[in-house]
Amino acid sequence: MVFSVSEYIIEIFRGLYSYIIAVIVVLASYIIAHYLSKKITALKTIIQPAIAINTARIVKLIILTTGVFVALSIIGVDLGGLLIAAGFTGIVVGLAAQQTLSNLFSGLAMIFEGRLKPGDVVRIGSDWGTVESVNVLSTTIRLFSGEALVIPNSVVFNSSIYNFRDLVARRIQLTIGISYNSSIDKAIDIIKKTLWDHPLVLAEPEPFIIVDSLGESSVNLNIFFWVSSKHFLQVRSTILGELKKKLEEAGIEIPFPQRVVWIKQTESTR
């Protein structure tokens, strides 16, 4: 009887010892995960912040999960049955959350690929704006009109993205119509002088103008010139205003659409 009680007490201490070791393993995994997460997050000054932050989250999750599984095996939990149950649960959850998983993997792919970075000026579809953040499930773009546009990453990943991140200069194309009675050569000379006199229009590549088409009420001139990317909208607006003013001062008409209407007179109306 004494032997049985002693053996029982030893088993209790063994169980307590296992639980203590398991708790130590979980705490150690948490400390390691927290330490590595901070170290990886600190790399955002070297690499893209989104990559650093999301990588830190993934590493932390992996280490904590591993620590919990190790702790469970120490206290004698059958991981085989647990893994089978987790597998079935994962299948059910995966089927119920296909869109979320699609956004997750699309986000991770874009983050590690570096397709978008905070601060990039982009056009996605008809939307123009500046990228504010690229997260694991969605991307936030601050539109030029001021609104924050949140797009699921799967949509962004499968869209054509126009990214103006690395553009030093951008080409501006304008179309201006002049009346058929106006001199084309004179209009081109005025346009060239206006462009050359503007301090933000680049000399290289050199601006050029072509006669593009003969419209219903105007001769249409296509104007091409280059500006610094950061001054794109400002220069485009001011140049349009200056061209209208200079052409009108020179007596060159910029006509509005016109129609010549012929009215047929019948015998009964004469």
Image: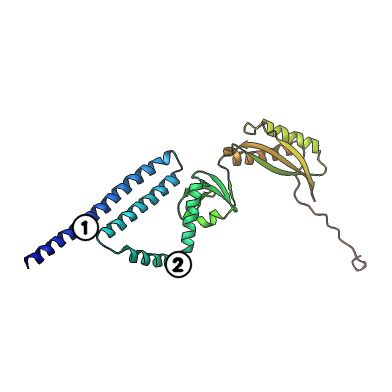
Vertical relation: 183 (above or below) 130:
above
Disc 2 marks a residue whose amino acid type is Ala
Closer to the chain start, of discs 1 and 2, is 1
- Residue 80 placement, left or right of 162: left
Q: Is residue 151 visible?
A: no
The mark lying in front, picked from 1 and 2, is: 1
Asked whether 104 or 164 is in front, the reply is: 104
- Residue 171 placement, left or right of 60: right
Disc 1 marks a residue whose amino acid type is Ser
Rendered location of residue 205, percent (x, y): 68, 33
Q: Residue 228 sits in which quadrant? A: top right
In the picture, the quarter occupied by the C terminus is bottom right
User: Mark 1 Cα within 10 Å, few/some/many (few <14, many 20+)?
Assistant: some
User: Dot 1 corresponds to which residue?
Assistant: 18
Spatial CA distance of label 1 from label 2 is 38 Å
Asked whether 128 or 105 is in front, the reply is: 105
Residue pictured at 69% horizontal, 31% vertical:
196
User: Dot 2 corresponds to which residue?
Assistant: 96
Q: Residue 259 sits in which quadrant? A: bottom right
Rendered location of residue 181, percent (x, y): 83, 42
Asked whether 20 or 128 is in front, the reply is: 20
Vertical relation: 83 (above or below) 47:
below
Residue pictured at 49% horizontal, 62% vertical:
99
In the picture, the quarter occupied by the N terminus is bottom left
Q: Is residue 25 visible?
A: yes
